[in-house]
Image (spheres, rainbow, N blue to C red):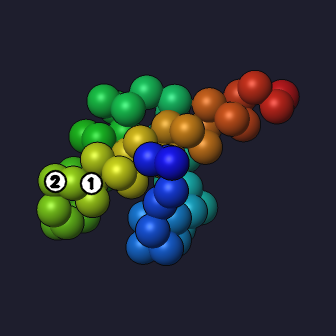
Amino acid sequence: MGRIKSKLVKRTSHSLLKEENNFNGNFEDNKKLVNGLGTSKKIRNQIAGYIARINKRKKIEK
């Protein structure tokens, strides 16, 4: 049950993925890229983790 993400996290993650292709399946790398948004640490980590999950899922599908 802990994997439910808010609309803010999903919307921000999808818009960042459309803008930049620098993200990958690694949480730590994504966290550094998302750091410039100016959000709280918790939201930053949720966005970076959600982007990592999306990219891992895309990699498996290919």
User: Residue 54: where, in percent of width, then height?
Assistant: 61, 43
Q: Which residue is label 2 attached to?
A: 41
Amino acid, disc 2 = Lys
User: Does 28 sit left or right of 7 as displayed?
Assistant: left
Q: Are marks 2 and 1 in contact (CB under 8 Å)?
A: yes
Q: Is residue 58 visible?
A: yes
User: Which residue does the image show at 62% across and 31% down from the upper left?
Assistant: 56
**Which structural element holds mark 2?**
helix
Q: Residue furthest right?
A: 62
Q: Which residue is label 1 attached to?
A: 44
Q: CA distance from mark 2 to mark 1?
A: 5 Å
User: Residue 19: where, in percent of width, then height?
Assistant: 53, 62
User: Does 14 sit left or right of 40 as displayed?
Assistant: right
Q: Nearer the viewer, residue 30 or 3?
A: 3
Count of marks overlaid on the render:
2
Q: Is residue 19 visible?
A: no
User: Which residue does the image show at 35% across and 51% down from the upper left?
Assistant: 46
Quadrant showing the C terminus = top right
Q: Nearer the viewer, residue 42 or 1?
A: 1
Amino acid, disc 1 = Arg
The numbered disc on residue 25 is none
User: Which residue does the image show at 69% across and 35% down from the upper left?
Assistant: 57
Q: Is residue 42 above or below residue 12?
A: above
